[in-house]
Image (cartoon, rainbow, N blue to C red):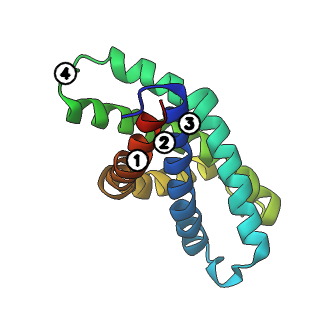
Amino acid sequence: MPTNKKEGLIFGVMMCFGMVCVMSIYNAIINGAIQDFSLVTVSEMVIGFMVALLLDLLLVDPLAKKIAFSLPFDKSKKLYVILAMSTCMVIGMVLCMSVFGLVTAALSNGLNGNSLFNAYLMIVLKNFILAYPLQLLIMGPLVRGIFMKFVKPKLTAAV
């Protein structure tokens, strides 16, 4: 999809924004905090977006590309590349952002008697259950479609 750093940044921002919005609402629902939706919740989403974007750009994306392209599959098939990259990205982002979720949960209401490891594992599991299908079936195709229709032609025309 993206063929240079500028396109990669735009694509990353779009994907990160969509995933953080949906995952933040999902986490608010499963933690019973959706009724407390306020300016504080929005500011937490903004902070979550900034953390996710930095993790995506600096750590997860480069590592996911390295891992995905080292896997033994036919890289000439676009679908295989998309599936490998999406899988590596979701695993990396869920593992990293679950640390962020664990820290924010511990700061706001403690770990409710759970061990740190058990609390982290539950957060990872709950996040992966939604993040993977969301990425593969909704957000990935949606962002790729928007990117190809609106962003890519403008960037190509500007050059």
Q: Which residue is mark 2?
A: 11
- What residue would you read off at disc 1? 147
Q: In the image, residue 111 lies at what x, y percent? A: 72, 59
Q: Earlier in the sequence, mark 3 or mark 1?
A: 3
Dot 1: element: helix
Tell me which amino acid carries mark 1.
Answer: Phe
Can I make out residue 117 in this image?
Answer: no
Q: Residue furthest bottom?
A: 35
Kind of element beneath mark 3: helix
CA gap, disc 1 and disc 4: 21 Å
| Front label number (1 vs 4) | 1
- Report how far apart the C-alphas of labels 3 and 1 lie in the structure: 12 Å
Q: Residues at badges 2 and 1 in contact (C-beta under 8 Å)?
A: yes
**31 above or below 77?**
below
Which three-letter amino acid code belongs to the residue tagged 2?
Answer: Phe
Asked if labels 2 and 4 touch by Cβ distance under 8 angstroms, the answer is no
Work out whether 97 lies above or below 26: above
Q: Are marks 3 and 2 in contact (CB under 8 Å)?
A: yes
Residue indicated by mark 3: 9
Name the quarter where the N terminus is drawn. Answer: top left
In this rendering, the answer to whether 89 lies above or below 72 is below
Q: Nearer the viewer, residue 17 or 2?
A: 2
Amino acid under disc 3? Leu
**Marked residue nearer the N-terminal end (4 or 3):** 3
Q: Residue at (56%, 46%) from the top-left corner?
A: 13
Q: Residues within 10 Å of mark 2 (few under 14, many from 20)?
A: many
